[in-house]
Image (cartoon, rainbow, N blue to C red):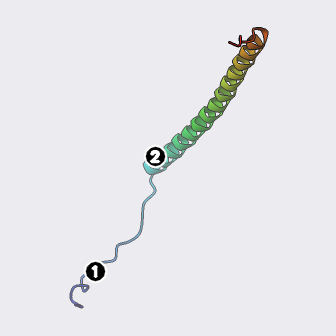
C-alpha cells in the first residue's frame, strides 16, 4: 500500500499572472458588473410596468362601477 503513494509529486502552486490573464480577468469582472446593472435596471422597469398596469386596471374597474351605478339592473 505504501508503494502506491511512493510516486506522488507535489506540483508547484505557481500561476504566472501575465498581462493576458490580467486583461481577461478585468474583462470578465466588467462583463459581470454590466450584466448585474442590466438585471437591476430590468427589475426596476418590470416593477414600474407592473404598477402602471395595476393603475390602468383599477381605473377601468372604477369606470365600470360608475357606469353600473348610473344604470341599475332591472329586477325581474
Residue 54, quarter of the rendered image: top right
Q: Where is residue 26 in the image (x, y as percent from the top left)?
A: 52, 46
* Dot placed on the residue nearer the N-terminal end, 2 or 1: 1
Q: How crowded is mark 2: few (under 14 residues within 10 Å), some or many (20 or more)?
A: few
> In the orientation shown, which residue stands out farthest toward the bottom?
2
Where residue 72 appears, x then y in whole percent? Answer: 75, 11
Q: Is residue 27 rendered to the left or right of residue 65?
A: left
Q: Quadrant of residue 14?
A: bottom left
- Residue shown at the point (58%, 41%) measured from the top left: 36
Q: Which of 63 and 27 is in front in this view?
A: 63
The residue located at (64%, 26%) in the rendering is 49
From the viewer's perspective, tell me whether residue 61 is left or right of residue 33. right
Residue 5: where, in percent of width, then height? 26, 85
Q: What element carries label 2?
A: helix
Q: Which residue lies furthest to the top in this view?
A: 71
Residue 65, disc: none
Q: From the viewer's side, name the closer residue of 46 and 57.
A: 57
Look at the image and tell me in which quarter the N terminus lies: bottom left
**Looking at the image, is 11 positioned above or below residue 67?**
below
In the displayed structure, does residue 11 sit left or right of residue 30? left
Instruction: Tally the marks.
Output: 2
Residue depicted at x 74% and y 17% = 65
Rendered position, 35 above or below 16: above
Point out the image quarter for the C terminus.
top right
In this view of the protein, which residue sits in the foreground, 30 or 21?
Answer: 30
Q: Name the residue under label 1.
A: 8
Q: Nearer the viewer, residue 66 or 35?
A: 66
Residue 50 versus residue 25 in the image, above or below: above
The local crowd at label 1, few if under 14, some if 14 to 19, many if 20 or more residues have their Cα within 10 Å, is few
* Helix, strand or loop for disc 1: loop
Q: How far apart are labels 2 and 1 at the CA level?
A: 33 Å
Disc 2 marks which residue?
24
Amino acid at each position: 500500500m505504501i508503494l502506491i503513494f511512493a510516486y506522488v509529486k507535489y506540483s508547484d502552486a505557481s500561476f504566472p499572472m501575465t498581462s493576458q490573464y490580467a486583461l481577461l480577468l478585468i474583462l470578465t469582472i466588467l462583463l459581470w458588473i454590466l450584466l448585474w446593472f442590466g438585471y437591476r435596471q430590468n427589475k426596476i422597469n418590470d416593477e414600474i410596468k407592473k404598477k402602471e398596469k395595476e393603475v390602468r386596471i383599477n381605473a377601468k374597474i372604477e369606470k365600470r362601477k360608475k357606469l353600473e351605478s348610473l344604470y341599475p339592473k332591472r329586477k325581474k
